[in-house]
Image: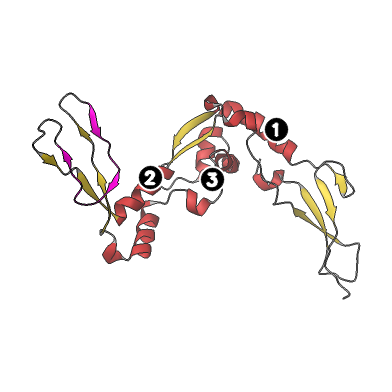
């Protein structure tokens, strides 16, 4: 089951052959987009956490999880990946090229920002969480030696920053295989037209070309 095969059709009046008003071109209605049913979105057990491997494509994930590479679109929709270029993780090579292109190779390892490191006292209690953006001179009192000062700060390079963002994209949540048939049935229902003046059949409507051919 491929995504475009499931989309409904539109018969659009042919504006190339202007000699005939009865000529129509059959196209897919790309403006209809599948979505998860609302009562599934908040059901945690309906989803499984998945870690995308290096260079792994959506069709390979679909083959592994659902046994069908053609269900790559199910992976993307249920993981809420709308903009593939921005939301899907880059390979190591692609990331290197992206960072070099964005910052310039000579600036890849420049410090972008400073962040706190994790600090706990001798009893294991957290004093300071990691990852807070601070300035380079940020300090706190030593929890075990109040007369001492700690500088729990680390520099984050441009490469570190972009790698972290890319790594976060590798963790997705996709629909469990046990819910797959339910989702596919919903997709088919979404792709059916209701009866109206343009109705031909549940999978096809006819749309007239509104271009003014005789101004």
Residue 116, picture quadrant: top left
The mark lying in front, picked from 1 and 3, is: 3
Identify the residue position indicated by label 2 in the image.
Answer: 167
Q: Position of residue 188 (x, y in %)?
A: 72, 37
| Gap between marks 3 and 2 measured at Cα | 15 Å
Q: Mark 3 touching mark 2, by CB under 8 A?
A: no
Q: Secondary structure at mark 2?
A: helix
Q: Is residue 167 above or below residue 113?
A: above
- Name the residue located 34 percent from the left edge and 63 percent from the top edge: 103
Identify the residue position indicated by label 3 in the image.
Answer: 81
Q: Is residue 119 above or below residue 133?
A: above
Q: Relative to 189, is 183 on the left or the right?
A: left
The mark lying in front, picked from 2 and 1, is: 2
- Name the residue located 70 percent from the left edge and 34 percent from the top edge: 186
Locate the N terminus by quadrant.
top right
Q: Secondary structure at mark 1?
A: helix
- Name the residue located 64 percent from the left edge and 39 percent from the top edge: 35
Identify the residue position indicated by label 1 in the image.
Answer: 185
Disc 2 crowd rating (10 Å Cα; few below 14, some 14-19, many 20+) is few
């Amino acid at each position: 089951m491929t995504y475009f095969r499931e989309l409904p059709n539109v018969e659009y009046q042919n504006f190339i052959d202007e000699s005939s008003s009865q000529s129509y071109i059959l196209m897919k209605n790309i403006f209809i987009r599948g979505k998860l049913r609302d009562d599934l979105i908040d059901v945690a057990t309906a989803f499984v956490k998945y870690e995308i491997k290096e260079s792994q494509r959506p069709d390979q994930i679909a083959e592994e999880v659902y046994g069908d590479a053609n269900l790559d679109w199910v992976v993307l929709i249920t993981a809420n990946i709308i903009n593939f270029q921005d939301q899907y993780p880059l390979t190591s090579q692609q990331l290197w090229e992206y960072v070099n292109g964005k910052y310039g190779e000579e600036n890849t390892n420049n410090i972008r920002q400073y962040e706190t490191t994790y600090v706990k006292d001798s009893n294991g209690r957290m004093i300071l969480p990691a990852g807070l953006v601070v300035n380079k001179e940020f300090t706190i009192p030593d929890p075990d030696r109040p007369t001492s000062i700690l500088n729990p700060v680390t520099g984050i390079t441009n490469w570190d920053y972009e790698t972290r963002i890319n790594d976060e994209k590798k963790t997705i949540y996709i629909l469990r295989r046990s819910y797959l048939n339910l989702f596919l049935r919903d997709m088919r229902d979404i792709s059916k037209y209701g009866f109206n003046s343009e109705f031909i059949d549940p999978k096809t409507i006819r749309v007239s070309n509104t271009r003014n051919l005789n101004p």
